């Protein structure tokens, strides 16, 4: 039986390994992590991440051919294939701070693999890493010089949160990069055989190592660029009377452009787009390509601009001050169908409004009060560096309450901001909400999910992204 061990039981390691276990009953999969609470949660009825369909997949194979463990070294030592799916955050200190990827977790995983291995192994980069990382990892893996052979492969993950199970079951493509040597190609074939259990052969792409590493950064940069492009257009729509949804539809009808990923929004969030683009920018700078770096940096700058623009719109519409006014924040997760708040635009919007002394009442169906308060207390990028977390400032929280119901959040509010596109926000009783709000009652739809005409008929003053006022 082939044995797979995955280091890192996070949003990627957990679901990807569960899918491999489900589709490959002949393979034993162990997911290991240094975080005891995370592993305990994977072994319980309350999984550590909310992802539609994940419970069923995990329950179908847990304790059969899928295991979660904190015995990191033991399972790494026993494995034939070791996936490394640890976090690769943005550096907050030192050279490249604010841009470069922090590979501390990756490096320590690689050192541990080298130290505990007693047999040859294929080591798979599942985390998103800077191009050329495999070269550094190879050096670390072979530092012991103990006759054990490692083949390193790049197998970046393209799943999106909220649709992870669908994406893993039917991926657009699986990408495997390896060395162009006979040993490298043998390792590529071994990993390909794992995915071939359920992924059609023509969807399994094989490339050299550097193409695979760079394709992951490129794919995220292209996706984020589409959002920044439509968000930039949304600003122009607001100034000209054009409607961004109509523009996006008309543009997306061109088969060369396509309709997906053209929803204007308050800004993209999530743990990866910003981090990966900043990393790409840094790599371009290090390779003496400042113009290319500048080009990609604009994608992040437009995203910041969009979040700031949203806050300015709220404040300016509400007579240039939100001081002492109650504002309901509906949605805190970075997108619907996840409880993940990493780099969510909600954090910047809340900070902007708190800076103007608003009183915030926040509701998200999947995010806890603790998580929201932690997020609002953190410095940028610190969420992935627990050692840098500052103690929370109690004064900041006097202005924030977290509630478990949208009607409670909006009661007596002067304004409502929709920050996450949860389905339930489309179905709320807006007449009831209007009746219980201060007047004039404002709604700022940061996701363009509400029926503007119906809301205006009720009496709301409505602002949507990129739509005529
Ligand atoms: P995560 O923070 O959810 O999980 C990483 C896990 O690794 C944590 O549980 C941490 O405790 C563990 N870990 C760190 N160092 C370890 C070590 N030395 N030994 C054992 N465990 C260790 O991160 P994630 O969202 O799963 O992302 C992982 C990687 O995948 C990142 O590089 C990310 O860019 C990439 N990625 C993420 C997504 C996504 O949707 N989240 C999608 C594609 C790619
Ligand atoms: C994204 C990519 O879609 C995945 O392919 C990739 O694997 C992953 O990053 C990663 O590397 O981590 P994810 O961040 O989970 O996945 O979610 P997306 O659906 O891409 O959404 C990202 C952000 O963009 C969200 O805040 C979303 O609301 C926003 N968005 C998305 C828009 O504002 N408009 C759109 O049209 C689409």
Image (cartoon, rainbow, N blue to C red):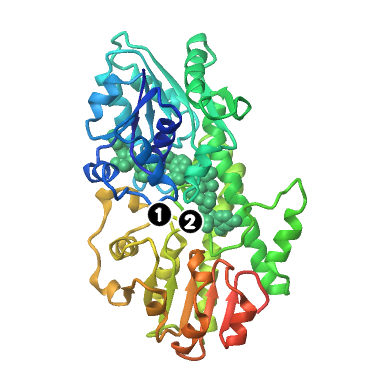
The image shows residue 427 at horizontal and vertical percentages of 52, 72
Q: Is residue 296 found left or right of 250 in the rendered image?
A: left
> Which residue is at the front of the view, 85 or 92?
85
Give the answer, above or below, for where 168 lies relative to 203: below
Residue labelled with disc 2: 269
Tell me: 412 left or right of 431. Answer: left
Q: Position of residue 250 (x, y in %)?
A: 76, 59
Going by the image, does 16 lie left or right of 172? left
Instruction: Mark 1 and ligand 1: say if the CB distance to the nearest ligand atom is below 8 Å.
Output: yes
**Quarter of the image with the C terminus in it:** bottom right
Residue that label 1 marks: 342
Query: How many marks can you see?
Result: 2
Q: Quadrant of the N terminus?
A: top left
Residue drawn where x is 40% and y is 54% of the image = 342
Is label 2 within 8 A of ligand 2 (CB to nearest ligand atom)?
yes
State which tag comes first along the sequence, 2 or 1: 2
> Which residue is nearer to you in this view: 67 or 291?
67
Q: Are marks 2 and 1 in contact (CB under 8 Å)?
A: yes
Q: Residue at x 61, y 62 (%)?
A: 264
For the point 35% across and 41% down, the residue is 59
Q: Residues within 10 Å of mark 2 (few under 14, many from 20)?
A: many
Mark 2 secondary-structure assignment: loop
- Distance of label 2 from label 1 (alpha carbons): 7 Å
Q: Answer left or right for 166 relative to 56.
A: right
Residue at far bottom of view: 439
């Amino acid at each position: 039986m082939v044995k797979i061990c995955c280091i890192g039981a996070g949003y990627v390691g957990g679901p990807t390994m569960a899918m491999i276990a489900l589709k490959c009953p002949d393979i034993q999969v162990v997911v290991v992590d240094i975080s005891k609470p995370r592993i305990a949660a994977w072994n319980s009825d309350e999984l550590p991440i909310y992802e539609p369909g994940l419970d069923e997949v995990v329950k179908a194979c847990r304790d059969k051919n899928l295991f979660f463990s904190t015995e990191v070294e033991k399972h790494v030592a026993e494995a034939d294939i070791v996936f490394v799916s640890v976090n690769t955050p943005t550096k907050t200190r030192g050279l490249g701070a604010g841009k470069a990827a922090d590979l501390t977790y990756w490096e320590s995983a690689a050192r541990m693999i080298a130290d505990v291995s007693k047999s040859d192994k294929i080591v798979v980069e599942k985390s998103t890493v800077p191009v050329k990382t495999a070269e550094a990892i190879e050096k670390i893996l072979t530092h012991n010089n103990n006759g054990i052979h490692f083949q390193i492969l790049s197998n970046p993950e393209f799943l999106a949160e909220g649709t992870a199970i669908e994406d893993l079951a039917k991926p657009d493509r699986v990408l495997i990069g390896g060395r162009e040597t006979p040993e490298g190609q043998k390792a590529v074939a071994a990993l390909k055989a794992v995915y071939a259990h359920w992924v059609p052969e023509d969807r399994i792409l094989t490339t050299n190592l550097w193409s695979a590493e760079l394709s992951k950064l490129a794919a995220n940069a292209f996706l984020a660029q589409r959002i920044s492009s439509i968000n930039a257009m949304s600003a122009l729509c607001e100034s000209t009377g054009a409607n961004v949804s109509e523009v996006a539809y008309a543009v997306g009808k061109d088969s060369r452009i396509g309709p997906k990923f053209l929803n204007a929004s308050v800004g993209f969030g999530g743990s990866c787009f910003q981090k990966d683009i900043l990393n790409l920018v840094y790599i371009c700078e290090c390779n003496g390509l400042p113009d290319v770096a500048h080009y990609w940096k604009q994608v992040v700058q437009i995203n910041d601009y969009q979040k700031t623009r949203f806050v300015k719109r709220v404040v300016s519409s509400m007579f240039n001050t939100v001081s002492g006014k109650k504002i309901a924040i509906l949605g805190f997760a970075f997108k619907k169908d996840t409880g993940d708040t990493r780099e969510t635009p909600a954090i910047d919007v809340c900070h902007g409004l708190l800076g103007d002394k608003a009183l915030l009442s926040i509701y998200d169906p999947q995010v806890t009060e603790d998580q929201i308060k932690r997020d609002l207390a953190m410095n940028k990028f610190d969420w992935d560096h627990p050692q840098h977390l500052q103690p929370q400032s109690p004064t900041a929280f006097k202005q924030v309450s977290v509630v478990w119901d949208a009607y409670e959040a909006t009661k007596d509010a002067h304004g409502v901001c929709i920050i996450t596109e949860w389905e339930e926000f489309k179905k709320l009783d807006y007449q009831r909400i209007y009746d219980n709000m201060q007047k004039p009652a404002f709604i700022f739809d940061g996701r363009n999910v509400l029926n503007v005409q119906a809301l205006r008929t009720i009496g709301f003053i409505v602002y949507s992204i990129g739509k005529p006022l």
